[in-house]
Image (tube, rainbow, N blue to C red):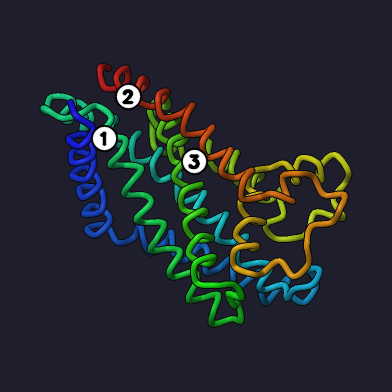
Amino acid sequence: MTFTKTLLDGAIVAKRNLIKIKRVPDLLVFSTISPIMFILLFAYVFGSAITAPGVSYREFLIPGIFAQTVIFGATLTGAGMADDIQKGIIDRFRSLPMSRSAVLIGRTGSDVANNVLITVVMSATGLIIGWRIRSSVGEAIGGFLLLLVFAYAISWIMAWVGLIVPSPEVVNNASFVVIFPLTFIANTFVPTQHFPSVLRTIANWNPVSSVTQASRQLFGNTGTAPLPKDPWSLHHPIIYTLLWIVGLLAVFVPLSVRQYKRAASR
């Protein structure tokens, strides 16, 4: 089966998933309300107590909220895959003359579209409370694209998880336990300079920190350059993030396709 045919099949599956969101708007409403609440709570409740070097806290905050939200948005992939297996929909797909990987491509692609919409809503909320993009249009577009591509790589991890766990509830609980601390032990909401030494090292090399730092850099929200003592990952956050993206896709795309064939045969 040709690559073009696989992409066409994937587009059909993606359309099916987007139609599901349209018919169940609660999925989109609640996934949008959560980041808006984070923006407002951190900006107005913690913003008066937290300072960021060389930049207003709101400009420091919004890229971190973007990173956290698109990563959590990627968990929809795992929950959706687990739900389709549980309901027998994957077995129906398997009986059709379509590419096996098209289901995964369609699922991950539709969740990128969902993340795009949520990012637009968050951007509007950020602009209302005082966030500003201080770089060029091209750099700003690059910042958004980097966030979405990183989330796309995470969605392949979640697709693999969704194929090996028994239910969507398990995916949601497991992803929360892992992703929530991962996004907090990072520079998403506060600078890492005052973290305990071990925690600071983990945070500085955390890919969530690098994608956040890269988006701040591309949006012009860095204020000051990284400190000389900061690691390579924060001095070159775009390259470090791209390396993580390539690595995650190289590992979890084939793992997910292989697991899909096994899961669909259950």
Quick one: 5 or 209, which is closer to the camera? 5
**Residue 67, above or below 171:** below
Image quadrant for the N terminus? top left
Q: Amino acid at mark 3?
A: Ile
Residue bearing mark 3: 154
Q: CA distance from mark 1 to mark 3?
A: 17 Å
Query: How many numbered discs sit on the rendered protein?
Result: 3
Residue positioned 66% across, 50% down in the render: 237
* Label 1 element class: helix
Image quadrant for the C terminus? top left
Residue bearing mark 1: 103
Residue positioned 39% across, 27% down in the render: 256
Mark 2 or mark 3: name the one nearer the start of the chain: 3
* Label 2 element class: helix
Asked if the residue at tag 3 contacts the one at tag 1, i.e. Cβ–Cβ closer than 8 Å, the answer is no
Mark 2 or mark 1: name the one nearer the start of the chain: 1
Asked if the residue at tag 1 contacts the one at tag 2, i.e. Cβ–Cβ closer than 8 Å, the answer is yes
> Residue 260: which disc?
2
Q: Position of residue 120 (x, y in %)?
A: 43, 68
